[in-house]
Image: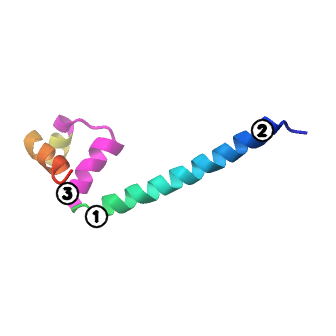
């Protein structure tokens, strides 16, 4: 037979899984509301971990433009 701690851990994992799923939904909805360019830049920075200089090189924008797009309406 399992220990009661095992059941508690399973319940916590289920709660965390639900939280992560809900958080993903909220983030996806928020990203979908962004203009295409702003969404791409946020994804490059926050999901892929690129810095502003790298994002500028990838997109062909200046580093200043990247910052403006990312922080616009933040």
Disc 1 + disc 2, Cβ < 8 Å: no
Q: In the image as oriented, which residue stretches furthest toward the right?
A: 1
**Residue at (45, 54) in percent of width and height:** 24
Q: Residues within 10 Å of mark 1 (few under 14, many from 20)?
A: few
Residue position for label 2: 6
Disc 2 + disc 3, Cβ < 8 Å: no
Label 3, secondary structure: give it.
helix
Label 1, secondary structure: give it.
helix
Which residues fall within the magenta stretch? 36-54
Separation (CA) of disc 2 from disc 3: 46 Å
Disc 3 + disc 1, Cβ < 8 Å: no
**Whole-percent x and y of residue 9?**
71, 39
Asked if residue 14 lies in the magenta stretch, the reply is no
**Whole-percent x and y of residue 68?**
12, 47
Number of numbered discs = 3
**Vertical arrangement, residue 71 with respect to residue 50, above or below:** below
Prevailing secondary structure of the magenta residues = helix
Label 2, secondary structure: give it.
helix
Residue 9 shown left or right of residue 20 in the figure: right
Q: Residues within 10 Å of mark 2 (few under 14, many from 20)?
A: few
Among numbered discs 2 and 3, the one appearing first in the sequence: 2
Separation (CA) of disc 1 from disc 2: 41 Å
**Residue at (17, 47) in percent of width and height:** 71
Q: Which mark is residue 37?
A: 3
Which quadrant of the figure has residue 44? Answer: top left
**Vertical arrangement, residue 47 with respect to residue 73, above or below:** above
Residue position for label 1: 33
**Whole-percent x and y of residue 17?**
59, 50
**Residue at (11, 40) in percent of width and height:** 63
Which quadrant of the figure has residue 29? Answer: bottom left
Nearest to viewer (mark 2 / mark 3): 2
Separation (CA) of disc 3 from disc 1: 12 Å
């Amino acid at each position: 037979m399992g220990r009661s701690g095992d059941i508690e851990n399973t319940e916590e994992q289920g709660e965390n899984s639900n939280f992560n799923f809900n958080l993903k939904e909220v983030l996806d909805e928020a990203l979908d509301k962004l203009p295409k360019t702003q969404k791409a830049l946020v994804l490059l920075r926050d999901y892929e971990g690129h810095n502003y200089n790298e994002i500028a090189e990838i997109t062909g924008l200046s580093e200043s433009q990247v910052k403006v797009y990312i922080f616009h309406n933040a």
